[in-house]
Amino acid sequence: MNAIPEALSSAIVTIDLAALQSNWKALAAQARAHSPATETGAAIKGEAYGLGMEAVAKALWSAGCRSFFVARPFEGAQLRAILPEALIFVLDGLYAGQADYYLSHALIPALISLDEAREWAANGKSKPCAVHVDTGINRMGMRADEYADVVAMKDQLHIDLVMSHLACSDEPSHPLNAKQRDLFAKYRAMLPDIPASFANSSGIYLGDGYLYDLVRPGVALYGGNPSPGQPNPMKTVVTLQLKIMQTKIVKQGDTIGYSATWTAPRDSRIALLGAGYRDGIPRKLSWSTDKPAAQVFVAGRRVDIVGRVSMDMMAIDVTDLPEAETARGTLVEIFGPNLPVDEAAAYAGTISYELLTHLGNRYHRRYIGGES
């Protein structure tokens, strides 16, 4: 992550490591309430969902987390340099011809095909692997016939974990949850002595039949709501604030920004903020006649985004706010404790995962809190 001084950045991302640790402990407690022996790991892929792998990994380790999941093998190597003793699972499986890379960094591939299992057996059979079987999400993972073949060759592998992934865990009543649960139970019974992992963030809240030996929360660690439609039990981890770069008066009937999409209904005071879609601010937050205006939080209240979000800037209507509270340099919350990340994402027609993982590299980043 770039270390940009706060004074030279037009935007600030604050990551609360104490809140992160609290969320991990809360998820662990939720899992243990249903299954006392269940371990809680952490998905830390994508630079820890955009928050910075090193700081996040160290904070989670200090909180008690010992099992981590990354997507790419190079992420695993980065994490190994940070946490020499951690268990590190690579969700992409085994890259062709790269067994030595995994072995040299003590990475555990989550094997997703019979071909991968055969390659690992030939190169790393004395070292741990996981087996990822597809139960209905139809992304990466073994087919039923491949899994049966891997079970038959189990003596050639050091299988430490059997895993699958839920497709609709954020919709508790979706019938695919039970279908996947029942199928995974069948697959797990084929390797009954091997630890199993099934539940992601939302899956932890599905309770009995989903938890098994190891849960692997992701977005909930970082403040996303694992139970959409219900109050969020997670603490806010990430706050994104943009500086007001300029305020100006726009006369009634004048327009703002590209394509002149917003026309001032009165003489208005407009604040220009120093970030745009280059910085991960979705262009879909732009004002439109087709939907309610997206909002931000400043001076104790919410105000509308107006005009188009452009590459480096965006505009908000601060007409009804005191001028002294919207001066140049004032910080405006895009998401955080006053405007939850899930709500900000909904304005843009997306999900919190996308907002977090698209945080740009032009922000000043600061880490606060956290027990060591």
Image (cartoon, helix red, strand yellow):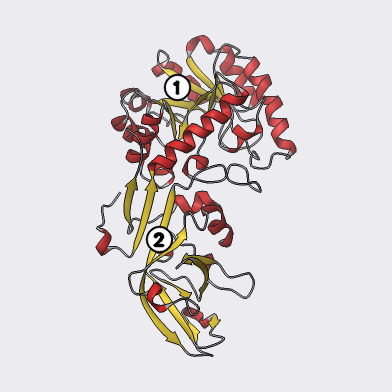
| Left or right: 275 in relation to 216 | left
Q: Quadrant of residue 168?
A: top right
- Describe the element under mark 2 as helix, strand or loop: strand
Camera-nearest residue between 171 and 33: 33
The residue shown at (54%, 80%) is 261
User: In the figure, 236 relative to 127: above or below?
Assistant: below
Q: Evaluate if marks 2 and 1 touch, with contact meaning CB atoms under 8 Å apart.
A: no
The residue shown at (64%, 38%) is 169
Q: Position of residue 288 (x, y in %)?
A: 59, 73
**Residue 71 visible within the image:** no
Q: Amino acid at mark 1?
A: Glu
Cα separation, mark 2 vs mark 1, equals: 48 Å
User: In the figure, 350 relative to 135: above or below?
Assistant: below
Q: Position of residue 163 (x, y in %)?
A: 56, 26
Sequence-first disc among 2 and 1: 1
Q: Residue furthest top?
A: 155
Which disc number belongs to residue 119? Answer: 1
- Badge 1 density bin: few <14, some 14–19, many ≥20, Cα 10 Å: some
The residue shown at (56%, 42%) is 233
Which disc number belongs to residue 241? Answer: 2
Q: Position of residue 87 (x, y in %)?
A: 40, 24
- Describe the element under mark 1 as helix, strand or loop: helix
| Left or right: 63 in relation to 118 | left
